[in-house]
Each structure stands twice: as structure tokens, then as C-alpha cells.
Image: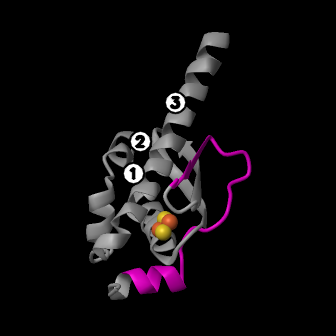
Amino acid sequence: MQYSKKVLEHFANPRNVGEIENPDGVGEVGNPACGDMMSFHIKVKDNRLDDVKFKTFGCGAAIAVSSMVSEMAKEKTLQEAMKITPSLVADELGGLPKQKFHCSNLGAQALHKAIRDYRSKKKTKRAKK
Ligand code: FES
């Protein structure tokens, strides 16, 4: 199995690892095939992702994918971030081995789930006013 230099670099030095205190949205996903898990925390300001952090309990590819998703998503509008797909992430990483492509699904899924969480919390807040 051959990993690109970029995958290895993100795996060795993952960006934006951790949690955000009082996040605006949280997205957690698990891969039933391997049991790996990923969670994304986001902070939203003026409809943009002001901060993005992740925690991944998983394989090297999943860690590299999370790191890349966090970089791709930062400063994007929520609409732009919702357009980040697993194949875009894999492309940005210089490709993933075929048998590891499923790992790239988790990153975009977790990010999108965090954005949906933010949107539903916002709706609830508005409804309470
Ligand atoms: Fe589980 Fe990669 S093997 S996410």
C-alpha cells in the first residue's frame, strides 16, 4: 500500500487536533467497518467557519483525512464547507490507496454533521425567542 507524501505528512503532523470550548456545532461519526471514530468541533462567525478542530481515533489515513478536512474547511462559508466531498479531500491529499478510500468518507461526514448540528441549534434558539 502506497501513501502519498502529503498523507504521510498530515499523519505525522496533523493540523487542528483537539476540541473547542463551547463549540457552536459538534459532529461525531463512526465507521462500522473498522470501528474507527472521528469528531469535529466548529466555531462559526458571520456564517464562516472561524475555527475547526477534530479528534480521530482511527487509522493513519483517517487522521490525515481529518487534518486535511480541517484545513480545507477553515474560513470557508458554511455553504462552501458543505460542498467538501470525500473525493475532493482524497485529491487534496494526492490520492489514497483504493482500500483506504472509505476512510476519507468519515472526514467530510463529520464536518457536515457538525454544520447541521450548528444549524439545528440556531433554529431552536430562534424558535425559543
Ligand atoms: Fe477505519 Fe481507516 S481503517 S477509518
CA gap between label 3 and label 2 equals 10 Å
**Looking at the picture, does residue 90 appear above or below residue 43?**
below
Q: Are marks 3 and 2 in contact (CB under 8 Å)?
A: yes
Residue placed most toward the observer, 12 or 101: 101
Q: How many marks?
A: 3
Residue shown at 41%/53% (left/top)?
108
Mark 2 C-beta to ligand 1 under 8 Å: no
Q: What kind of element bears circle 3?
A: helix
Q: What kind of element bears circle 1?
A: loop
Please, which residue is most extreme toward the right here? 21
Q: Quadrant of the C terminus?
A: top right
Compared across the picture, whether 8 is left or right of 19 comes to left
Mark 3 C-beta to ligand 1 under 8 Å: no
Residue shown at 60%/16% (left/top)?
126
Residue shown at 33%/52% (left/top)?
84
Residue ID for mark 2: 78
The colour scheme used here is one colour
Tell me where the magenta segment starts and ends, as one range: 7-32
Compared across the picture, whether 40 is left or right of 106 comes to right
Q: Position of residue 117 (x, y in %)?
A: 56, 35
Residue ID for mark 3: 119
Residue shown at 31%/46% (left/top)?
83
Depth check, mark 1 against mark 3: the one in front is: 3
Residue type highlighted by circle 3: Arg
Residue type highlighted by circle 1: Lys
Q: Are marks 2 and 1 in contact (CB under 8 Å)?
A: yes
